[in-house]
Amino acid sequence: MKDHVVIEEQGLRDGIQNLTQIIATEKKIEFINKLVEAGVKRIQVCSFVHPRLVPQMADAEAVCAALPIQKDVIFSGLVLNLKGVERGIDAGLSHLACSISASDLHSQKNTRKTLQEAKVDFGNMVKSCQQNNITVRGGIQCAFGCRYEGKIEKEHVLDLVKHHLDMGIEELALADSTGMANPVQVEALLSEVKALTGEIPVVLHLHNTESKGYANLYAAIKSGATIFDTSFGGLGGCPFIDSASGNIATEDTVHMLHQMGFHTGINVKRIAAISNEMESLLGERLQGNMYDLYKNADIEII
């Protein structure tokens, strides 16, 4: 449908990876079930990374083993190296997001590899996925800027897009990992990226660090993007990026999209309830807005 926008929920991966409070496996599964009940059809449930570096993801295999059987829901995991791919395959996932950074400095902090080394690893990751009938989403982190390197040239990002496409990815994700993007930049980059990708879907992974996340989403929609990563409550942030803050919030994004006349199939009220539960669990306010409004039964939400 032309007016349908697809949301991939990343609260259980990007959303919680920065939290110091470890979320129990059982609670993660409970949240996943509630997301499914709310109508979410794509959920990134974990990342296969070293537990010493990201303790929140130490139970990745246990989470995958307890996933509900839902034929119409895509459960995926993030992988940053070949070992991660092997773990993801062994865990039984059919969709893996293989991601590298457009920033050499961020790449070294995030994976301890230079960008050139990461590109070689990326090819090996994609090949392994293809040999095991895994659907590959190729990601480019820091596609709109880096806190360590500053501006990332558009031509450099386009070269990485071509590299990913040459590897045979089935979906391309552009991540504003640091929240530095602006709407004009998003629209300009997307117009050239989509000219390269053709029928291959392009996903936008937006952070709201500088309060431009929703403006960037609107610019992306104007440029023809229809798939977005979000995180309930606006949770999120990268352990390897200074001052990284949350993703655009699922309930805020879906609420705005519905007001604009788009369909998502997602129940905003149910997502807000999940965020309110997470707020109570953490004992602190989350970065999103709509979940807080849903606490007030006396106000009208259209």
Image (cartoon, helix red, strand yellow):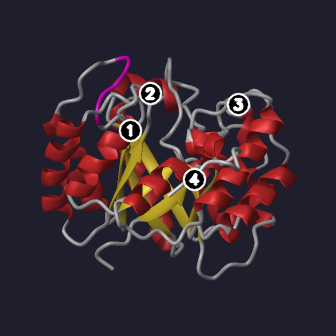
Comparing 239 with 91, the one in front is 239
Which badge, 4 or 2, comes first in the chain's sequence? 2
Distance between the alpha carbons at the discs numbered 2 and 1: 8 Å
Crowd around label 4: few <14 · some 14–19 · many ≥20 (10 Å): few
Stretch of the chain drawn in magenta: 144-148
What residue is shown with label 4? Answer: 300
Q: Is residue 268 left or right of residue 181?
A: right
Of circles 4 and 3, the one toward us is 4
Residue at screen point 68% across, 48% down: 298
Magenta span: predominant SS is loop
In the rendered structure, which amino acid carries the disc numbered 4?
Glu
Q: Position of residue 291 (x, y in %)?
A: 63, 45
Residue type at mark 2?
Answer: Thr
Residue bearing mark 1 = 213
Tell me how far mark 1 sits from mark 4, CA to CA: 25 Å
Dot 4 and dot 3 residues touching (CB under 8 Å): no
Q: Earlier in the sequence, mark 1 or mark 3?
A: 3
Label 4 to label 3: alpha-carbon separation: 33 Å
* Closer mark to the observer between disc 4 and disc 2: 4
* Residue highlighted by disc 2: 209
The amino acid marked with disc number 3 is Leu
Check whether the beta carbons of the residues at disc 4 and disc 2 lie within 8 A of each other.
no
Secondary structure found at label 4: loop
Task: For mark 2, give the secondary structure.
Answer: loop
Q: Please state the horizontal and vertical placement of residue 173, each as a whole percent of the image.
A: 37, 53
Towards the viewer: 227 or 48? 227
Residues at marks 2 and 1 touching, judged by CB atoms closer than 8 Å: yes
- Eyeballing the image, is 215 above or below 271? above
User: Which disc is residue 19 wearing?
Assistant: 3
Crowding near pointer 1: few (<14 within 10 Å), some, many (20+)?
Answer: many
